[in-house]
Amino acid sequence: MRIGLLTEGGYPYVSGEAGLWCDRLVRGLEQHEFDLYALSRSESEEAEGWVPLPPQVGRVRTAPLWESVDDHIVHGRRARRRFAECYGELATALCTAGPGNPSAGPEGEPEGQSALEADRFASALYGLAELARDEGGLTTALRSETAVRALERACRAPGAHRSAREARVPDLLTVTARLERALRPLSLDWYEDDDLGSVDLCHAASGGTAALPGLLARHFCDVPLLVTEYGVRLRTHYLTEPDSSPAIRSLLAAFHGRLAAETYRRAAVITPGNTHARRWQERCGADRTKLRTVHPGMDAAPFAEAGESPECADPQTLVWVGRVEPAKDLVSLLHAFAEIRRAEPGSRLRIVGAPSGPEGAAYLIHCKALAAQLFPDEADGPHAVGRNPVSFEETGGPELPSRADAYASGALVVLSSVVEGFPAGLVEAMFCGRATVSTDVGAVVEAIGGTGLVVPPRNPRALAEACVALLRDPERRARLGAAARARALELFTVEQNITAFHGIYLEILSRTPARRVLLGDTGEPLPFGVPAEAHVPGRWSDPTARVAARGGPGTARSGPGWAAEAEPARAKTSVAASEGAGR
């Protein structure tokens, strides 16, 4: 089958989010063909280029979200009127978004009103998409004074919530600019029968703006949509830009909440990466019958040697591995280690990781200063060099060439975060067969099951007590480590992830009406002419039947399956080279 993979700030860019997962998915499903539709977030991301693409990638199309583009389209009176009506309806849906839905605050909203506003948002969104298709784009219109005026009228109208009524001109300008960026996919020329309309399935690698092309492909061409979220974009929006004014936060949260609800409503299947993400999706209106939890797939091979040799670990060493940033709460870990040292004087803590951005660099300096204050250098004798029991290191050096070596160096792995999505580092430690002590955040409990100890976040004493209990009980550590490795190999490998998505692809297509008509000898459509098995390699259908693929009837070629017969061969390399900018 042919899959349209939709990304935002991700694959195929070198520095893209979830790029490794997408690459493993594409390479693992080599029996299928993938077309990539990528939205880039920054000029630097495009300048770094793409990762090497496998041969099953047939087409790559990219579009920037960071660049302000003027489409130079002059709309006529009728088009301007259509735009003002649609954008006004969209703004009204955002300003009256009641607090009972994910995009609102503490007050309630009647269920009927919520459904009405959701329909109003969807009608306005698709109205703008149809206008953009008719006129060739809406980029300039979305930044125009007409858009600002429409948003202002919606904020001042009766029934608008308080935060919207308090919006000032700078707030309106900021929100209009953010909405233009989020709605930029409306103006792309991706939604024709020979483009996204020709794929069998759209797979959005995240929610939010990345899923918008999938919504439009479904609206214009009836292409089914699969949405995968390992981190819910709406939750990410809530956690960013806390310094913005209440009006900006409220209006943008209303937009992202409405977009998430519409995405979940139109998607054929939604695959959260963990129960934490699943709860967010259900809160945003996702139908439980559409949800399939698919844990992230990780490569266990680099950690096999450490997992098979647990006896090589230093029994007195604790290890923390990850990105150094305030959300990881290393300050609490250091205070907890002070109590651990009082109970176990020979213990040692290795903090392994690089800072994340300028904020992470400043946080690392603070943590080093705190460690020097809490743990003065200790020497074994009067002529020995002092040594601090806490070390700050990075992988890639002679002592710790890889993350697997970092986990293997200690008998106990600690996670002290206050904010966490899916704890990939914790799963790596499980692959290594190490016992873990973690804070109860995000999907930590779901990942470790009963194979590790969990304590409340920001509680150094509880963290210290759990660590001391395992340091003093090597047999328990060994049991937990072995159970953790078995659980990780069962649930979190690349193989299980790829197998799950292959099954979901087939499930969606088996429930999707055929969009290509199969004709018999008389020229009449054949009932049930395209069964679900036709998408599986093999001679499932009558080789003498003729195929009409939107453009009209045509003679089917002999081949292993209907999907190959209905689609002419394409020169993959040349298409990717011509359509993918910035490689």
Image (tube, rainbow, N blue to C red):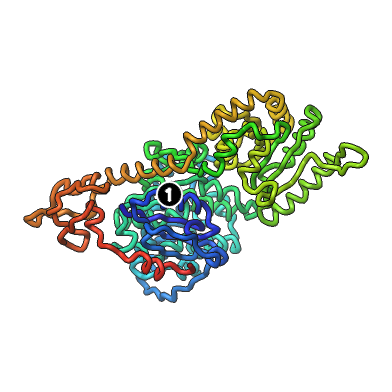
Residue for point 65% across, 36% down: 413
User: Dot 1: few (<14), some (14–19), or many (≥20) neighbours within 10 Å?
Assistant: some
The x, y position of residue 250, in whole percent, is 56, 51
The x, y position of residue 446, in whole percent, is 53, 33
Towards the viewer: 214 or 498: 498
Towards the viewer: 172 or 134: 134
Residue furthest to the left: 522
The x, y position of residue 39, in whole percent, is 47, 61
Q: Secondary structure at mark 1?
A: helix
Q: In this image, 541 relative to 224: left or right?
A: left
Q: Note whether 140 is above or below 454 in the view shown.
A: below
Residue for point 81% across, 29% down: 342
Q: Is residue 375 visible?
A: yes
Query: Which of the 4 image quadrants contains residue 579?
Result: bottom left
Q: Badge 1 is on which residue?
A: 25
Q: Is residue 284 visible?
A: no
Q: Note whether 230 is above or below 60 in the view shown.
A: above
Residue furthest to the right: 382
Q: In this image, 301 relative to 325: left or right?
A: left
Residue for point 40% across, 36% down: 288
**Number of numbered discs:** 1
Q: Amino acid at mark 1?
A: Leu
